[in-house]
Image (spheres, rainbow, N blue to C red):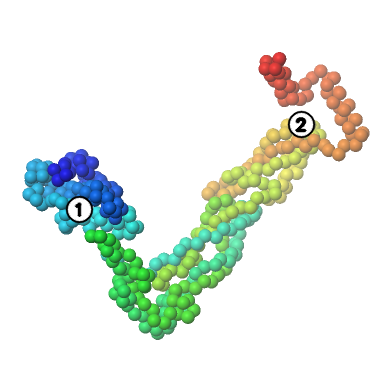
Amino acid sequence: MANRDYYEVLGVSKGASKDEIKKAYRRLAMKNHPDRNPDDADAEARFKEASEAYEVLSDDQKRQAYDQFGHAGLGGAAGGGGFGGGGAGGFGDIFGDIFSDIFGGGMGGGGRQRASRGADLRYDLDLDLETAIGGDTVEIRIPTLDQCDACDGSGAEKDSPVDTCSTCQGVGQVRIQQGFLSIQQSCPDCHGSGKKIRNPCKKCGGEGRVQSSKTLSVKVPPGVDNGDRIRLSGEGEAGEMGGPSGDLYVQINVKPHEFFERDGNNLRANVPVDMITAALGGDIDVPTLNGKVSLRIPAETQSGKTFRLRGKGVQSVRTSAPGDLLCKVSVETPVNLNAKQKKLLEEFRDSLENSGRSHSPATSSWLDKAKRFFNEHLG
């Protein structure tokens, strides 16, 4: 195994860069590390072989000697998967990267926990369409964690001494041995703060923060839409150890409207029209967000026809020109007819059939297609 080509061990070419060599080694080391493969002698051997190869190829001088003379050029400088400090890349660096992947943190020298920023918060704000389009100032009430005013966020009673944590000696982290390697993690006694509070604040119980709620005024700009967010800086949760507060993000949800449906900058509306007006034409009143307008319905208008009222839509926060109102006509068939009305409709139908002209082109076309289908497929 000691005579195996180091480039082959790591699976890289002889012209590989240091970064490529490092990535190849990390991949093999993570895969074959003894902690991940307990009681697997083959994995341990592969791990040692990869470590030996990396120790040589990550060091410029050793790599040059190896490239010229092979294993004989090393003169015993490498072998057995030694874990000394050799190598320009540094095993501390490479293992720190591996620990970051395996355990979620590196071996870097952590210090005492510093003040940390508070968490960001989200608030879902439901608005009616008129408010979303026209804008307004809305008051909201949110639960949050505020800095404790009794201890100013320190977690200790006023003038109460704070001791250095005896477990971590104030560092905030402890070192745990993992075989021949060691890992640092947050101190379990002081939770990374590096200190022990003798007399916790009675109001916050030593947390430095208290649960509360607050009322905020949110300025809703005209033209907001579903999914838009309004950021209120510093209105999130209070930070730990006296750190700055996070932000509050107000998420806009626009409620359904009884008349309109928003489509970008346009508004859509379904407009029912009686059969007589659709056939003969006429004017109908249509609601808009700024009052009603008159819509001209041409004679012989068919159901599904869409009319555009320009400038009667939405002016969003991202554009300067308003959209349009799109009115889709739905021709309504009369109901609750009395006998006289039914007779008049029958006479009207007879007059259409006897006129010798087509008064329902879509119906005639559909019937012709249906007849051809029956003759061709069902004939």
Whether residue 184 can be seen here: yes
Which x, y percent locates residue 356? 81, 18
Instruction: Identify which residue, 323 or 87, lies in the foreground.
Output: 87
Q: Amino acid at mark 1?
A: Gly
Q: Quadrant of the N terminus?
A: top left
| Residue drawn at x 32%, y 54% as measured from the top left | 101
Crowd rating for badge 2 (residues with CA inside 10 Å; few <14, some 14–19, many 20+): few
| Residue drawn at x 33%, y 76% as measured from the top left | 165
* Numbered disc 2: secondary structure: loop
In the displayed structure image, the side of residue 234 where residue 198 appears, left or right: left
Task: Residue 259: give its label.
Answer: none
| Mark 2 and mark 1 residues within 8 Å of each other at the beta carbon | no
Q: Amino acid at mark 2?
A: Ala
Instruction: Identify which residue, 353 or 297, lies in the foreground.
Output: 353
Q: Quadrant of the C terminus?
A: top right
Which residue corresponds to mark 1? 89
* Numbered disc 1: secondary structure: loop
Whether residue 233 can be seen here: no
Outermost residue on the bottom side: it is: 159
Which x, y percent locates residue 157? 43, 82
Crowd rating for badge 1 (residues with CA inside 10 Å; few <14, some 14–19, many 20+): many
Tell me the CA gap for discs 2 and 1: 84 Å
In the displayed structure image, the side of residue 55 where residue 326 appears, left or right: right
Count of labels shown?
2
Between disc 2 and disc 1, whose residue precedes? 1
The nearer-to-camera label among 2 and 1 is 1
Which residue corresponds to mark 2? 299
Which x, y percent locates residue 214? 55, 69
| Residue drawn at x 68%, y 43% as measured from the top left | 269
Instruction: Identify which residue, 97 or 271, lies in the foreground.
Output: 97
Which x, y percent locates residue 367? 73, 22
